[in-house]
Image (cartoon, rainbow, N blue to C red):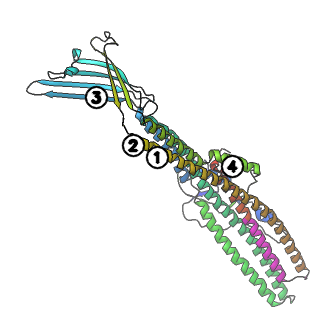
Amino acid sequence: MNLPTFIILRLRLVPIIVLLTVAPLCAQKSMDAVFQLPDSVISFSIDEFYKIILEHHPVVKQARLLNEVALQEIRLARGAFDPKLEFFWDKKEFQNKTYFDRMDGRVYFPSQFPVNPKIGWQQNRGSQLNPSEILPGDRQLYAGFEFPVGRGLITDERRAALQQAKLYQNIAAADQIKLINKILLEAAKDYWNWYHAYYNYRLINRGVTIASEIFRRVRVNAVNGEAAPVDTVQAKITLQTRLVEQQEAILNFQNSGIMISNYLWNEAGEPLDLALRVAPLLGPEDVALSLQTISSLTEQARQNHPELVKFRNKIGQLQVDRQLAREWLKPRLDLNYALLTDPSTPTQFNPLDDYKFGVDFSFPILLRKERSKLELTNIKIRGTEFDQQQTEREIVNEINAVFNEIVNTGVIIRQQGEMVDLYDRLLRAELLNLENGESDLFKINIQQEKLIESQSKFLKMQSLYEKAKAALYWAAGVQNLNFNATE
């Protein structure tokens, strides 16, 4: 990815000092003037922010390693079905006499079916061999299989391990979504804090401009004898108050910008900083949130929320354990068959006569261990299902709670916007009265203070609204907080 030109490599500690070109502001301008960025300032949207995080953030890269871990778990489980080569050699020589020289090599082919084929070659020599070990021509080829009729017919440890590894892949994918969503939610909160700090600074700048202009006019009037000297003191106090607020706003903007830099990295894994002429941007409303939208998000959360996906797959793993535990209630009854032939005359054999057959049988009489293991697994399944029910309820309630917050905040934003317009009209009226000599500093200061407070609250509510939107998608478990990285 080509990084935006306003992202710079952190070669040294760069203090984020506000050096933005601020157009002259006056009281006659509405709140829109705060959001109108100068041409020298470059906007940095939340989508661009998300895109950089998803491509280069170390925590995101770490989360994506979970998929590799899951693939290796499946590979590990499949390793139990790899063909197995075995070789056995046992020889005894004493006083120039060969007592026995036994050799046996075979290849097993474990499969995901209960039948396990094998092919082998056997050679036995010596004067002290057991009669059952004497072979025609001293050697023999065999091919056969092992087949469990009882325990192990439906499933066994190897097949159960593979099933659980496949389910773990779904758990790993859910954990990945959960981790990435968490870092994006933290980033969104810091971004909107930065948004509030930046535009609040611009707002305070307007207050400084107004207070400075008032102080200039009062001082001129005092020199001309048209205003009392105490009015100059009052105007100076107001200006100093605005300058103190400006310094506080600068500090808040600096620190919020530093927090944004925590999420910025390039392809080489090097930390990045924002250039000084970058500003956050409030984009258009991407979706109209309604009860229908929440209903859809709730249903989507029930199906795809990472926590619920993890619970379903954990229950699936426990069900595999239960199926395996049930297998251990069965008696062990394994059939072994091998077709035998003399390698010197491979075409001369009779499958009805030249064979080896065996049966392995065992069965614990009381089955206390097996029955206890099955019951313990059932208890774990019930306990996990209870956790799943409670978690699902908490998720649905959290979605509804965040939606209520969004709706309420939206109403407050509209009402606060109206208050801003009204306070702005009052301040403009007082300034006009001041021009006509019909007002005083006390009234102007009150109106200006009320206007700044209402505007600051308006910005704060905008920030809270956007945070709540990100929290809504996080609560619903929507991947990447509904951000489409392909856009």
What is the CA distance from the residue labelled 2 to the residue labelled 1? 11 Å
Quick one: label 3 or label 2, which is nearer the N terminus?
3
Image coordinates of residue 173 in percent, x first then y, are: 55, 45
Q: Nearer the viewer, residue 1 or 81?
A: 81
Q: Residue at 43%, 41% (x, y): give it.
A: 371
Measure how far apart labels 4 and 1 are at the Cα level: 33 Å
State the separation of the CA atoms marked 4 and 3: 60 Å
Residue found at x 28% / y 28%: 87
| Precedes in sequence: disc 2 or disc 1 | 2
Q: CA distance from mark 1 to mark 3?
A: 41 Å
Element class at badge 4: helix
Mark earlier in primary sequence (4, 1): 4
Q: Secondary structure at mark 3?
A: strand
Q: Residue furthest left?
A: 95
The residue closer to the viewer here, 310 or 180, is 310
Q: CA distance from mark 2 to mark 4?
A: 43 Å
Q: Which residue is mark 1?
A: 376
In front: label 1 or label 3: 1
Q: Work out whether 22 lies above or below 96.
A: below
Give SS at disc 2.
helix
* Dot 1 amino acid type: Leu
Q: Nearer the viewer, residue 258 or 345?
A: 345
Instruction: Describe the element under mark 1 as helix, strand or loop.
Output: helix
Picture disc at residue 87: 3
